Amino acid sequence: MHWQTHTVFNQPTPLSNSNLFLSDSALREAVMREGAAWDVDLLASIGQQLGAAESLELGRLANVNPPELLRYDATGERLDDVRFHPAWHLLMQGLCANRVHNLAWEDEARAGAFVARAARFILHAQVEAGTLCPITMTFAATPLLQQLLPKAFADWLSPLMSDRYDSHFLPGSQKRGLLIGMGMTEKQGGSDVLSNTTRAEKIDGERYRLVGHKWFFSVPQSDAHLVLAQATGGLSCFFVPRFLPDGQRNAIRIERLKDKLGNRSNASSEVEFTDATGWLLGEEGEGIRLILRMGGLTRFDCALGSHGLMRRALSVALYHAHQRQAFGKTLITQPLMRQVLSRMALQLEGQTAFLFRLARAWDNRRSPEETLWARLFTPAAKFAVCKAGIPFVAEAMEVLGGIGYCEDNELPRLYREMPVNSIWEGSGNIMCLDVLRVLTKQFGVLDLLSAECNEVKGQDRHFDRAWRQFQQRLRKPSEAQGREITQQLYLLGCGAQMLKTATPPVAQAWCRMMLDVRGGVMLDERVQDDLLRRATGGAG
């Protein structure tokens, strides 16, 4: 007998073979507006490659086949290596070929290189986020090493600045491309790195002997790590290579790989230093200062990564809504669904404008005003964008319904990936304390903020009211209000950029939605049409 229980219909096809750059009008405009118009052709090519089904499949494979720790080889010799699925290596090759790890650090880097690099980072984040961890740490460490790299490793500068990915288990001097990791966190301290107990005893010159542990030792397969340890002069920063100059393995023992909620493709480890050798960077006692120089860069990448994941979630939801029918109409034509999707698109419009203004500030870091702009808004961006990502992806899941909750779809992976960016490089409270520190102790910051907000004063009453309220709150800022102050600062930064760059209807819609404390804001149909068209690459 032949049984046919049902036919399959009204099931949308998954999103693949799209151009991640050309389908994002806000991203294209931000890249051109903030100084990287010279990169749009390459970004379009990268967007086409990354949006292909083959690239998306690499992202899936890298996560369902997490790395394995190889503590010993077949003969019983200590190995302390990490084995990855081939998909990981292909993704890393693409990131390095696109110079996401070093684009802004060339001697003659083009104006707008930071902006172009931010766009490339966001595009890659939409395909696979775990591979961005070694990339962002290498990016943050490179300018420090360009100044302070120990003489014994002078030949590392060339491969550090190359566009090659080299996964060979070899000393750095024998490789075509290098990656740098970081080791800061210990069991008893977390963000309180001053409580670190790893000891550093001077051997000779710049060389020290390290004994201790790291509770989170990111990307243990890196060619070297920047490690905090207590020296005679205080907490100091050390360059700890995987292989010593004579070719011998350094005494870094990998105890285990972390079993994480998300970020499954990436290896995070616990290690012990058993008389490991490290080279002092800078002076003893300068560890915090040097780490903070890198911290702003890694925090900015956290915000970019979360934004990229949010953008992918919206793209998946929109593609589904254009195909799926319910109650006789496609979801995209249902009034309530259009409100949901257009509000999500509007939220990303504000984030995009703000993050690329921040990228321009980093690009112009030789300017004291732009340096201060980046110093103020980077921790605010990390706090607000990373926090917003978790409910945003959950909303995208609801658009798809039950299929969005199943592992056949990519949204569960995006959802699991979201919390790490809020935690890594300083959790939410640490970002808020940093913002308060800048607002209360950094000379000229209030004048900078006033100039930013006064430039758009009078264009929108919701923004003007939020700015007045923020000024009142700053008269007696308290640590207990740190989250509210940081969130409001971020919203003012986004609102100012929207009022400067977006069309008046879209800018005012953003201000109503994000700054009107009464809530219940409804977007009119023309604004909805504009936002949904832009979110799929159409002109505004």
Image: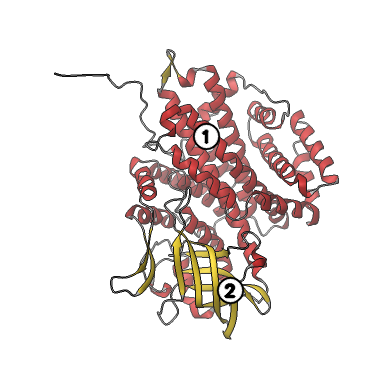
The residue under label 1 is: 394
The residue under label 2 is: 148
- Image coordinates for residue 126, horizontal then vertical, percent: 46, 43
CA gap, disc 2 and disc 1: 44 Å
Give the mark nearer the N terminus: 2 vs 1: 2
Q: How many residues crowd mark 1 within 10 Å: few (<14), some (14–19), many (20+)?
A: some
Q: How many residues crowd mark 2 within 10 Å: few (<14), some (14–19), many (20+)?
A: some
Q: Quadrant of residue 410?
A: top left
- Image coordinates for residue 394, horizontal then vertical, percent: 52, 34
Q: SS of the residue at dot 2?
A: helix
- Residue 17 is left or right of residue 218, and the answer is left
- Residue 172 is left or right of residue 235, and the answer is left
- Image coordinates for residue 459, horizontal then vertical, percent: 74, 30
- Residue 271 is left or right of residue 446, and the answer is left
Q: Determine whether label 2 and label 1 are within 8 Å by CB.
A: no
Q: Amino acid at mark 2?
A: Leu
Q: How is the image coloured?
A: secondary structure
Position of the N terminus by quadrant: top left
Image height of 504 relative to 379, above or below? above
Q: Residue furthest bottom?
A: 204
Q: SS of the residue at dot 1?
A: helix
Q: Can residue 460 be seen in the rendering of this structure?
A: no
Image height of 158 relative to 40, above or below? below
- Image coordinates for residue 136, horizontal then vertical, percent: 52, 57
- The one nearer the camera, 300 or 437, is 437
Residue displayed at 69% across by 39% down: 491
Residue 194 got which mark? none
Mark whose residue sits in front, 2 or 1: 1
